[in-house]
Image: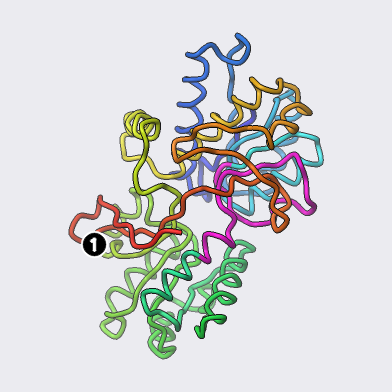
Amino acid sequence: MGALAPLTRPGWAEAGQHLLAGLELAVREVNDDGGIGGRPMELLVRDTAADPRRAEAAVDELAGLGVAALVGEYHSVVARAAATRADTLGLPYLCTSAVLDALTEQPTRRIARLSPPQSCGWRVYADFLLGAGHRHIAVATQPSLYWATGTGILREHLTAHGGTVTELDTTALTPAALCDALADSGATALLLLVGHPEPAVPIVRSVRADKRLAETLIGAPAGQPEFASWAGELGEDGTAIPFLRYLPERLGSLGTRVETALAERLGTPPSFVAFEGYDTITVVAEALRSHGTDRASITEAWPDVAVEGTRGPISFTRTPDTGLWQWTWAPIQVVDRDPAEPGRFRILHAG
């Protein structure tokens, strides 16, 4: 299996490490259970470093090495480049964590995805904001298809309910200037649609230190506060910042067992990304066992796969808005870190 993950900067390496931990744990368990038809599963891992061109080159290399399928990737724009290239080469791909609705230029039967599409998750986040009384929202943005798409989803959903969205361009504003613009805007919430740690961390510090903004909610729908580095960099300032994650309220027996194993492997509580990695291999292993190991057979397996994942039963349907095979029942939560106990997450909303 070819596996893509951001393992070095400027990629979100911490997310890549969690993703890889989930993939590797599941592969080890598959092989301990006899492998696929008596043959071991092997991961050929390539670091994308959040670079779409590097991901495309990795897909070319892995396809040339004869991998049966492709798995992984966290960054949406990178996954889109990888998915488009894999489809062109006839290589089936199960995308682990990326959420851009359209992962390929054209509809395809080769590509499947575990994570919810961005339009689904970010609408859940918008519903959370509305339910908490936030109708005038500011977004701190950077140039990116992912951030621009997220802004559009939020604007469409909030506007339909009487809300407004003000964009603050972080390429033109220092954190201090952004605070001035935020105070003048009258927005009651600021959403971080920017990279981590820069410029997200200095923006949070500046907003927290500005007395004019003491009542302003800071949000991070893309999930930056999920990882331990966020708490380490920001401490108390990094708490009470709602974000999206894809976990159920309670894990079942499989999820609990895997959680323990992942924590031992990572040395820290696993993020939802680690569970996505584990579930990815669970799905692919079932596809290989039930339909065979050649690429055409794996492509035909997506609509037939039905497995128990760490976060619930997994099966795939075709969704016209995404043009690929999609797990439509991935759990979605809005959570934050508890100010009284930063290592604990509070569930604020579920969709």
Residue extending farthest to the top is: 38
> What scheme was used to colour the molecule?
rainbow
Residue 294's quadrant in the figure? top right
Mark 1 lies on residue: 236
User: Magenta includes 100?
Assistant: yes
The answer to whether 73 appears left or right of 15 in the picture is right
| Vertical arrangement, residue 128 with respect to residue 186, above or below | above
The quarter of the picture where the N terminus appears is top right
In this rendering, the count of numbered labels is 1
User: Magenta includes 19?
Assistant: no
| Vertical arrangement, residue 275 with respect to residue 281, above or below | below
Name the foreground residue: 232 vs 156. 156
Q: Position of residue 210 (x, y in %)?
A: 29, 80
Image: magenta residue range: 96-123
- The residue shown at (66%, 33%) is 70
Q: Position of residue 212 (x, y in %)?
A: 29, 85
In the image, what residue type sits under mark 1? Glu
Q: Main secondary structure of the magenta part?
A: loop
| Vertical arrangement, residue 228 with respect to residue 65, above or below | below
Q: Secondary structure at mark 1?
A: helix
The answer to whether 228 appears left or right of 96 in the picture is left
Q: Position of residue 249 (x, y in %)?
A: 35, 49
The answer to whether 331 appears left or right of 291 in the picture is left
Q: Position of residue 252 (x, y in %)?
A: 37, 36
- The residue shown at (38%, 52%) is 226
Residue 17's quadrant in the figure? top left
- The residue shown at (74%, 23%) is 66
